[in-house]
Amino acid sequence: MLSVLRNRTYRRLLGAQIVALTGTGLATVALALLAYDLAGTDAGSVLGTALAVKMVAYVAIAPAVAAVADRLPRRALLVGADLARAGAALLLPFVDQVWQVYVLIFLLQAASATFTPTFQAVVPDVLPAERDYTRALSLSRLAYDLESLFSPALAAALLSLITYNWLFLGTVAGFLASAALVASAVLPGPARSSPLASSSPTDSTTASAPPTGSVRTRATAGLRLFLAVPQLRALLALDLAVAAASAMVTVNTVVYVRDLLGRSAGDLPPALGAFGAGSMVVALLLPRVLDRVPDRAVMLRGALLLTPVFVVLGAITEAGGGSWRWPALLAAWAAFGAACSMVLTPTGRLIRRAVPAEARTSAFAAQFSLSHSCWLLTYPLAGWLGATAGFRSAVLALGAVALAAALLAVRLWPAGGPAPVEHEHAGLPAWHPHLADARRVGGGWRHSHHPLLDGLHAHG
């Protein structure tokens, strides 16, 4: 898996992702303490609203950025987003009103909604060989999981030496370091459509290049891609299934640990860590699995696995007592993490195959926006149902959402999609990125991949 780190550009991009995630983790801890200082016992309400503001920024901003992203230098866009995030984080220690928190969180997350889809669209151009890209996706998943474990521990260590306001400076440093790493990397430009690509008919696995025209037309191009391609429609259903499980973990872990099981606050990190551990184990195993097993099989099985885990969680919830409930909860959270990772890790491969290269930015922006729309639905559902109707209702409702979404994904994703096609390219130079995994034969290059609609492949 680590062989992709030999690529200097990708190595710097991964480093930028890691330091930015670490800074974000520090900000999460500091923001909770800031909310308590400003609102006291109403801090939960402040954080809930801040989370909603974050999701609204993600849903609204990412498609708008996609409308102009391919017309701007990628490196400048990424560096500018990092600097904007650093500026917003730098102002957070000085706020003294709750509304100021909401404004700065919106600005910070709007910059994140610019950075993340653009970053996701760059990586497959940096690593054009599918084997390398698959390993990069697993490393990215590991970075997210490790951040969820490392950042709280780092924050706890720092808080023993400094006040929480100084944690925001760690956030600023993380974003500035990310900007520096991106600025030092040589990034490929966005792919452009060619006459062959634009005149070729679409097939069942690809979509045509996003249209030019008004800002509104370009902003909705990614959404139209998702509606047009069966695999991407299925991906939206899979995102909803994942959101149902992750919302249960994110919102209700503390209540399960402290109230339902009556355990100490010290047991909260291991519970959250179980989710991350399950996800990391799968992320480590998936590169080899995906070399042999289709994405469809892995992702749909991950989504369907969520339902039996919800059944186990229901048993834990209904049981009146018993020491078995604590290890059972850890196992359920680890299974949730593993199942979610089975869905999330191959997502980039699916998008890369489903759309032409020049449409990737729009597609990744749409995925970013639509997936967070799912969380915008499931986060309040997990919190409000758990608080007002009890955990049984929350488990039943979110379990039903996960099951319905998984079954919908099975129905939407056709089972017999086109297999990889072996073919030759003549006339391409040896350094061309599309030939990264090709072998020399006669006067050309031979390799195989799933059907693509671009200027390099004619379709009859």
Image: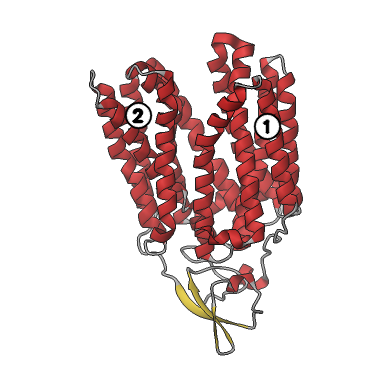
Q: Is residue 207 visible?
A: no
Q: Nearer the viewer, residue 198 or 267?
A: 267
The amino acid beneath tag 2 is Ala
Q: Residues within 10 Å of mark 2 (few under 14, many from 20)?
A: some
Q: Is residue 196 left or right of residue 447?
A: right
* Residue drawn at 54 percent across, 56 percent down: 136
Q: Nearer the viewer, residue 252 or 161?
A: 161
First in residue order: circle 2 vs circle 1: 1
User: Which residue of the protein is positioned furthest toward the bottom in this rendering?
Assistant: 442
| Mark 1 residue element | helix
- Tell me: residue 291, above or below residue 151: below
* Residue drawn at 37 percent across, 61 percent down: 293
* Disc 1: which residue: 170
Image location (x, y in percent) of residue 276: 44, 38
- Tell me: residue 220, above or below residue 125: above
Q: Residues within 10 Å of mark 1 (few under 14, many from 20)?
A: many
Nearest-to-viewer mark from 2 and 1: 1
* Disc 2: which residue: 397
* Residue drawn at 66 percent across, 48 percent down: 66
